[in-house]
Image: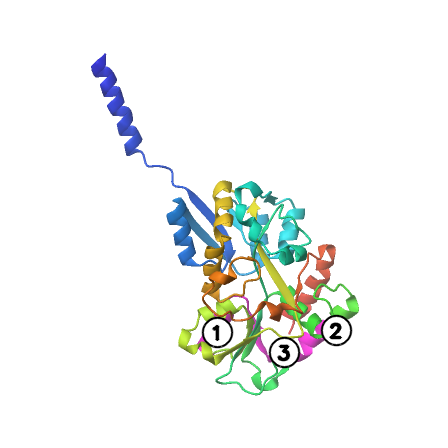
């Protein structure tokens, strides 16, 4: 019997040691250029959880993929208007605050702006900023530092704007002195005329994916886009040739947040990652990596070591894009006459 027991024990031990352990994995679905590799490696080493990242270029692409039934993502990073939509559509799971003690560092000002979820019941802010304009100042001089730069005929066929209806229409509305969330048909018609008659004739295209590479190669001399994407494509010694600015007339501002979608396989790891990224020293590394200002985490700034590409004060006249509900059809119809018509 003792021999039999010993053989059984050896057999069980062999099975336990020879069968591979199930690997813990966290699946992220985030914007391109938005997840520092060093922090991902640090998270993996700290928690023994492998991180797999898929990327999207627009909120519309992300939303369409999830609505079409994509499963398995544990953490998604939508902008505020789509956070609001996803909450209404019951596409996200509630946030367990007890698992994220670093929520104490989230800026009250940011939560004040996040009227769709001010208590972080469904989402946790990741970063608040805005798209701006990059100019190759080595090859371009004497230009307006505002949205009107896209009216500059001498730059025709060397410029692009984002392939994003809320951004482009919002830019025009703000330039005209209106809210980026306006649903006034006269104001929207005025914005459409501005884009179609003054801006679009000078654009190569609307581009949300390749604008940074096209700018870095010199194909485009002026692009609307995100600072982190533009500078990422350039060697640091070329940064001095870039004039990146947020037009003072204002425009759409974004508040990207972290949400746990229904169907997530690893909600525990999702909560761990949210808490990890908002550790002040860690969040400062995130800001440094992309030269962001500290707009969301109140305790990160003292740990920063780089100069931001723009400052929180530059966002003064910027406005968060909100979920337009049924009025989004007004924008979709308008965009059809801008994006797809000659």
Residue 254 to residue 24: above or below: below
Q: Residue at x 48, y 48 (%)?
A: 273
Which residue is most to the front?
Answer: 302
Magenta stretch: residue 202 in it? yes
Q: Residue at x 64, y 79 (%)?
A: 148
Residue at numbered disc 1: 214
Q: Which residues are magenta?
A: 191-218
Looking at the image, residue 188 sits to the left or right of residue 253; the answer is right
Give the Cα distance between marks 1 and 3. Answer: 21 Å
Which residue is most to the top?
Answer: 1
Query: How far across and how far down the image is residue 257, in percent?
Result: 57, 54
Give the Cα distance between marks 2 and 1. Answer: 30 Å
Q: Residue at x 51, y 53 (%)?
A: 278
Mark 3 lies on a secondary structure that is loop
Residue at numbered disc 3: 146
Mark 2 lies on a secondary structure that is helix
Task: Find residue 238 and report its image quarter.
Answer: bottom left
* Residue 128 vs residue 138, the one in the foreground: 128
Residue 9 makes an appearance in the image: yes
Dot 2, how many residues are within 10 Å of its Cα: few (below 14), some (14-19), or many (20+)?
few
Mark 1 and mark 3 in contact? Answer it, CB < 8 Å. Answer: no
Question: Which label belongs to residue 190?
Answer: 2
Dot 1, how many residues are within 10 Å of its Cα: few (below 14), some (14-19), or many (20+)?
many
Magenta stretch: residue 195 in it? yes
Dot 3, how many residues are within 10 Å of its Cα: few (below 14), some (14-19), or many (20+)?
some
Looking at the image, residue 288 sits to the left or right of residue 9; the answer is right
Mark 1 lies on a secondary structure that is helix
Tell me which label, 3 or 2, sits earlier in the chain. 3
Tell me which label, 2 or 1, sits earlier in the chain. 2
* Residue 228 vs residue 164, the one in the foreground: 228
């Amino acid at each position: 019997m003792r021999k039999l027991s010993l053989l059984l024990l050896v057999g069980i031990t062999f099975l336990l040691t020879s069968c591979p352990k199930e690997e813990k994995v966290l699946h992220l679905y985030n914007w391109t250029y938005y997840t520092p590799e060093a922090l991902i490696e640090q998270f993996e080493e700290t928690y023994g959880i492998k991180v797999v990242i898929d990327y999207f270029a627009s909120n519309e692409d992300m939303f369409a993929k999830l609505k079409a039934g994509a499963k398995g993502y544990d953490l998604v990073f939508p902008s505020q208007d789509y956070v609001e939509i996803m909450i209404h559509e019951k596409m996200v799971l509630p946030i367990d605050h007890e698992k994220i003690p670093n929520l104490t560092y989230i800026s009250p000002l940011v939560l004040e702006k996040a009227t769709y979820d001010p208590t972080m019941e469904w989402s946790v802010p990741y970063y608040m900023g805005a798209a701006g304009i990059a100019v190759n100042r080595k090859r371009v001089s004497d230009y307006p530092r505002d949205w009107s730069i896209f009216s500059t005929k001498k730059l025709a066929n060397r410029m692009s704007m984002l392939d994003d209806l809320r951004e482009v229409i919002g830019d025009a509305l703000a330039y005209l002195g209106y809210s980026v969330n306006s649903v006034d048909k006269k104001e929207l018609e005025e914005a459409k005329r501005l884009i179609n008659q003054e801006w679009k004739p000078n654009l190569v295209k609307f581009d949300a994916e390749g604008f940074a590479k096209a700018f870095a190669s010199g194909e485009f001399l002026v692009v609307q886009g995100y600072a982190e994407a533009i500078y990422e494509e350039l060697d640091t010694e070329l940064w001095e040739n870039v004039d990146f600015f947020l037009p003072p007339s204002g425009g759409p501002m974004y508040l990207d947040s972290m949400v746990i979608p229904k169907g997530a396989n690893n909600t525990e790891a999702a909560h761990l990652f949210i808490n990890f990224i908002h550790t002040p020293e860690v969040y400062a590394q995130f800001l440094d990596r992309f030269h962001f200002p500290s707009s969301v985490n109140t305790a990160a700034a003292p740990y920063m070591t780089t100069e931001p590409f723009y400052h929180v004060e530059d966002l003064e006249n910027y406005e968060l894009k909100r979920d337009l509900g049924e009025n989004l059809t007004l924008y979709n119809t308008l965009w059809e006459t801008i994006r797809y018509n000659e």
